[in-house]
Image (tube, helix red, strand yellow):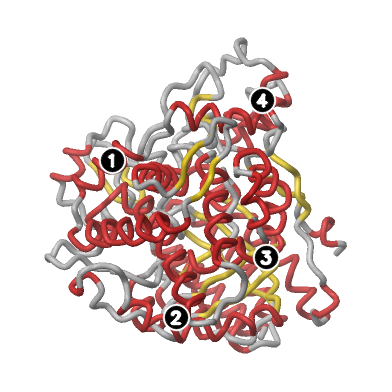
Amino acid sequence: MKKIFLAVLTLGLLVSCTEKTKQEPKKQVTTIDISKTDASKMKAKLNQYAKVPLTTDLSKLTAKEKKMIPLLIKAVQTMDDLFWYEAYGDKDALLSQIKEANTRDFVALNYGPWDRMDDNKPILASFGEKPAGANYYPKDMTKEEFEKSNLVGKDSLYTFIERNDKGELVAVGFRDKFRTELMKTSSYLMQAAAFAENSGLKNYLLARAKGLLDDDYYNSDALWMDMKTNHLDVVIGPIETYEDQLFGYKAAHEGYVLVKDMEWSKKLAHFVSFLPELQRGLPVAAKYKQEKPGTKSDLNAYDAIYYSGEANCGGKTIAINLPNDERVQLKKGTRRLQLKNVMQAKFDKILVPIADELIDPSQRKHITFDAFFANTMFHEVAHGLGIKNTINGKGTVRKSLQKYASALEEGKADILGLYMVMQLHKKGELGGDMKDYMTTFMASIFRSVRFGAADSHGIANMVRFNYFKEKGAFIRNDKGTYTLNYEKITQAMNDLSSLILTLQGDGNFDAVAQLVKDKGIIPAQLQKDLDRLSEKHIPVDIIFEQGVETLGL
């Protein structure tokens, strides 16, 4: 194994030596004015997050698996600096100028000087609106200039767009921009692979280590899908495109270290076989459901033990659906990872208190963790349903809808997740009262809309809230609580499912933009109700105590 490690490392060094010299990130010199920053206000902002330790039962792991965990955590930690640069720029230059501790901590929590849970409003007086393209594009670049350019790789997931000495746009690959950092990440993954007793995990780690240096993740994504019996897992690299609000083209670096719950995973495995049947039954015209979802997809439950980069900013993910590569999805399906310990923490600390404040007392008994888990799980499964490529030659849905693709996809997964729950409940595959799933679904909307309009999940939930309201799926009572109309929820679910799938299949950018403009907003009355949650000190989200010390390693 040592020979393999040295060979791959040597290959990486040879590639690095022959590539174009890395362009050093430009320093962002900004005079930080915190004179208007109220330390107590910043502390109150921090207190909107509940602290949660990320732990799991390590007794079921082997000695070698325990040795892998610190190396995987080190690999994942490197994603933090890369995401900082993508989201903002020079982290050290920013944080070093902020002397007030609460302000510095809050800026660090947000990976930049904009509040992610408050529509990216500036935290510091010196900063204006956050650039829609984050740090992926020149600040003076217009959309027209970008669209007219013939630049090769401009819409790649894995490039920055910069200007050369002549002021021309150039594409710089992540592998060039972050060469030094990615070599370190690659090394940690290969060291971890040396301890891997599971052949699938070993092969994946070595392939991912190489993919990070090549900006090519197809092979490692395919190998990741082939893993079935691994106890440990790591999700790492440039993955989601939420940070790029200009076009939605550029991926952001992130990482998770996970421990699989083997018993729970066995319980979930059989649901995947229903995907083709559920695809055929989608409430939309036949031409929008012609694609066949892969049935090799996995449903698994995990405990998360480390988050970093894009995964660790703003609202924390409680489930993952990957890979995003449409080629791998159509060939091998996807893997849905339910992060059970994080999900339980959000249910206990956030969802139940929200329901006690906003759901009508007669319906609160229907708020259950099993329903929350199922709704979340089938949200991730529903990413595999519907349509990935437009029906009119506009290419993939992601590229045709650009910056709105992520929000609409999250909205699709939410509503089709509920559709799947209803169908499986009718078949007797899911137990419990259907009212549990619907009521918990509604309470989850209140939880997610607090993420704000800067978050794709927040936008998706606001669209659904306003759509459901128009359809009479719920009413707001005089006492400030909400009562669900269970019959009308079903019709609203079918109608919204059809609308979203049609917009995706048509690649109708303008119509999606109008939908977000009309319904991706928080009405004044809802905002007052959400303010009540803050007044009751109900957390907006969670932050983690994590690392080897938290795990007792």
Location of residue 120 in the rendering, given as x and y in whole percent from the top left corner: 48, 32
In the figure, is residue 229 to the left or right of 485?
right
Say what secondary structure mark 4 lies in: helix
Q: Residues within 10 Å of mark 4 (few under 14, many from 20)?
A: many
Q: Is residue 165 above or below residue 307?
A: above
Closer to the N terminus: mark 4 or mark 1? 4
Q: Which of marks 2 and 3 is nearer the N terminus?
A: 2
| 118 displayed left or right of 92 | left
Q: How crowded is mark 2: few (under 14 residues within 10 Å), some or many (20 or more)?
A: many
Along the horizontal axis of the image, is 139 left or right of 502? right
Quarter-wise, where is residue 499 in the image? bottom left
Residue 158, can we see it? no
Comparing labels 4 and 1, the label whose residue is closer to the camera: 4
> In the image, which disc is placed on residue 340?
3
**Is disc 3 in contact with disc 1, using a CB cutoff of under 8 Å?**
no
Would you name the residue on which mark 4 appears? 103
Query: Quick one: label 4 or label 3, which is nearer the N terminus?
Result: 4
